[in-house]
Amino acid sequence: MKRFYILFIAIFICSGCRVIDSAPETGNLPKASFQIILQETGEVVLDDTHFDYYEIKNNDHVLHLNESGSKHLENFVTMDTRVNPSTPFRTLYLKMFSVKLNGTELYSGKFFSLMSSQGYNGVVIMDVVVINSTKTLTITLGYPTPGFYQGNDPRNSEVLFAYLESLGKLRK
């Protein structure tokens, strides 16, 4: 009888054990995600669900926003009602951003406006304020012209391009 209990306990203990494979199952891994994040607050300005496609056109990288993306950007633009007519207040203007893929930073830059009088040697996202009329967001080098940018183009990430291509959202 004592052996029966020991055998029963051994079977009970072993039934809760399983061999753990060191390689994770691909179905359980988190989905990669393209995000543009405000460095100051960590807020997601846009992610890959907010645009229909990412187009490389001339020397610009252009996000063609969907309705969800346009509405999400409205959270970052407020109207200044102190003037008549009301005008958009640039809440993203000169704010630093990071472009991330699956949590890893690919590059960073600043939000700029066509109304700006200062130059910048970095990656620039142009005029979020006019997004309602154009439904596009342009990621460019340097401001006011690419001549202000010096260095390699960090936007040309093969990892990013492969990810966007896997979603069917890359157009060259």
Image (cartoon, grey):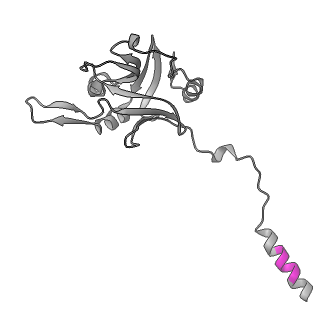
Q: Is residue 152 above or below residue 128?
A: above
The picture places residue 31, in percent across and down from the top left corner, at 57, 41
Q: Would you say residue 8 sits in the magenta stretch?
A: yes
Left or right position of 124 against 86:
right
Toward which corner of the image does residue 4 lie, by quadrant? Answer: bottom right
By secondary structure, the bulk of the magenta-drawn segment is best described as helix
Q: Nearer the viewer, residue 167 or 24?
A: 24
Residue at the farthest left position: 84
The picture places residue 89, in percent across and down from the top left corner, at 21, 32
The picture places residue 107, in percent across and down from the top left corner, at 49, 28
Q: Quadrant of the N terminus?
A: bottom right
Residue depicted at 52% across the width and 17% down the height: 152
Q: Is residue 44 above or below residue 2?
A: above
Q: Which residues are magenta?
A: 6-11
Residue depicted at 70% across the width and 46% down the height: 25
Q: Would you say residue 73 sits in the magenta stretch?
A: no
